[in-house]
Image (cartoon, rainbow, N blue to C red):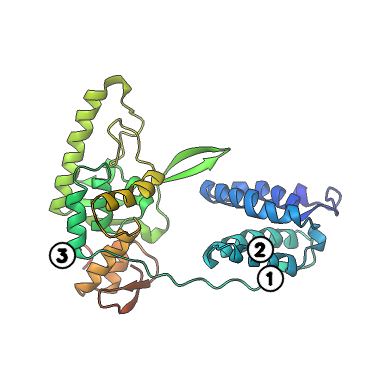
Amino acid sequence: MHAMDSRKNYDENILYFDYLKLWIEKVKSNLELTTYTSHLQMINSRIKNYFTLNPVKLLELEPIYIQNFYDILLADGLKPTTVIRYHAIIRKSLDYAFKNDLIVNNPADKVKRPKKNIFVGSFYSENELNTLFEKSRNDPLHLVILLTAFYGLRRSEVLGLKWSAIDFENKTITIKHTIVEVKIKGTNRILGKDRTKTNASHRTLPLTDEIIIALENAKKQQKYYKKKFKKSYNTKYEEYVCLNPDGSIIKPDYVTRHFPLLLKNSGLRHIRFHDLRHSCASLLLARNVSMKAIQEWLGHAHYFRVRTHNQTVHTLKSPFHHSYFYILN
């Protein structure tokens, strides 16, 4: 039993929210930094607001308090999937207390967990993607868009792509690095990871001729800007592929904010940046590429749902030519 949880040091009158703050710091070392910062942000916002207005002791916390909290979140317009994230934090914190004999049962186990809302992403047709490629040719996100649409990459994967993952000789690209942005003590920080979301996400794919040309141009541009900016050029991220002209890394938040503006200014239909990933899956499916191949191409461990142009929903764990799959087939 941990020091925080020994009976002699345990305050039986501790409020649940005060316990929650102790719990998150206690388990911090076992969490990914991104998970910890996300949990902390949720704890210090809506959870804090609710349990400040409804102060209840850990020992007296009943399911009705938790259920009321979820009902308020849903009434405020939060999606069920977001409420489920709050549920996960509360349940894990109480499970920790139960396993350490601080409470006799976990009240969160008796609360009805919100059902996940089924989401079917939007996507672009091949013609729309080609228009997007042309319209974005002089945009800072052009290479990011190309790589995402061709390979169905996650935002963290495309921004985390390093030159060491590009094999021009054997014409392959390996997805094994990620970039995430987290807020620590009020300051946004960029974190690079030498691993992907899951083992299935780590994958090696063929370089297409279009992408080879785009990457070679990016290399030339980075050399040009390094000479142009001279001492003011940021050399910290030279190993990364997708950079701003001054050498700084393209931030995830910038992609999310800038992409819809690009679409609007280009007269293109609105989709989310992540929908480029859905677009890749939909085009592959339309060309009768096997679900297994699409699953491996996109780096999914399981199948999921994608809607094709005829509105048929296929179950798969979600480019433009069959030849792209010579490594997978």
Task: Give residue 116's position: percent from left, percent from top.
Answer: 51, 71
Q: Residue 218 or 199: which is nearer the viewer?
A: 218
Upstream in sequence: badge 1 or badge 3: 1
Residue 84, located in which quarter of the rendered image?
bottom right
Residue 11: give its label.
Answer: none
Query: Element at badge 2?
Result: helix
Q: Are marks 1 and 2 in contact (CB under 8 Å)?
A: yes
Which residue type does callout 3 highlight? His
Task: Give residue 255's position: percent from left, percent from top.
Answer: 35, 47
Kindly identify the residue that appears in the image at 82 percent across and 61 percent down.
59
> Image height check: is 266 above or below 218?
below
- Left or right, 144 with respect to 25, comes to left
Query: Element at badge 3?
Result: loop
Q: Are marks 1 and 3 in contact (CB under 8 Å)?
A: no
> Image height check: is 157 above or below 122?
above
| Residue ID for mark 1 | 109
Task: Give residue 77's position: percent from left, percent from top.
Answer: 55, 63
Residue 91: give its label.
Answer: 2
Kindly identify the residue that appears in the image at 35 percent across and 37 percent down.
249
**Furthest-top residue in view?**
231
| Residue ID for mark 3 | 321
